[in-house]
Image (cartoon, rainbow, N blue to C red):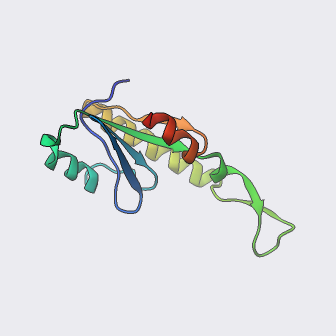
């Protein structure tokens, strides 16, 4: 997939990292395009010299790991259970389809965001 001219993000749910003529937009929780503030900002800043926007979503292993329950430490819980995981996968799939329909692509990675983002920004 390519970059395209579109990126994504949103209030409290995403962020962007600019480097030269490329900007990474990290989707975290806000996986919509239509009412996404970073898309409006991107269109408004088209003359800023940024020629490529790369939207990225990182599946963080920690979100799916078992952790001790705060109510009963002997029991394990997961932050993202099977139903939420299915909903998340559907939302990321829909985001990718929306970006592709606009000529863009969603870069998907697996791992710790604090490790993956610097690699992508380099």
Quarter of the N terminus within the rendering:
top left
Residue 102 in the image: x percent, y percent?
24, 34
Q: Residue at x 55, y 46 (%)?
A: 113
Quarter of the C terminus within the rendering:
top left
Q: Quadrant of residue 74?
A: bottom right
Residue 99 in the image: x percent, y percent?
31, 37
Residue 44 in the image: x percent, y percent?
14, 49
Position of residue 50 relative to residue 67, above or below, is above
Residue 104 in the image: x percent, y percent?
30, 32
Can you name the residue that lies furthest to the right here? 74
Q: Residue at x 53, y 36 (%)?
A: 109
- Between 84 and 105, which is closer to the camera in this rendering? 105
Q: Residue at x 25, y 51 (%)?
A: 34
Position of residue 2 relative to residue 75, above or below, is above
In this image, 38 relative to 46: left or right? right
Q: Quadrant of residue 11?
A: bottom left
In this image, 49 relative to 59: left or right? left
Can you name the residue that lies furthest to the bottom here? 71
Q: Residue at x 34, y 24 (%)?
A: 2
In this image, 110 relative to 74: left or right? left
Answer yes or no: is residue 87 visible.
yes
- Between 23 and 3, which is closer to the camera in this rendering? 23
The total number of labels drawn is: 0
Answer yes or no: is residue 30 visible.
no
- Between 117 and 72, which is closer to the camera in this rendering? 117
């Amino acid at each position: 997939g390519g970059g395209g001219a579109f990126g994504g993000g949103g209030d409290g749910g995403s962020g962007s990292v600019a480097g030269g003529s490329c900007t990474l937009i990290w989707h975290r929780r806000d996986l919509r395009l239509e009412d996404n503030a970073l898309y409006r900002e991107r269109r408004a800043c088209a003359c800023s010299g940024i020629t490529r926007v790369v939207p990225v979503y990182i599946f963080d292993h920690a979100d799916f790991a078992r952790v001790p329950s705060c109510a009963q430490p002997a029991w394990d819980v997961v932050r993202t259970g099977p139903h939420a995981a299915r909903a998340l996968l559907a939302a990321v799939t829909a985001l990718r389809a929306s970006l592709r329909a606009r000529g863009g692509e969603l870069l998907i990675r697996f791992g710790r965001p604090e490790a993956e983002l610097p690699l992508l920004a380099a």
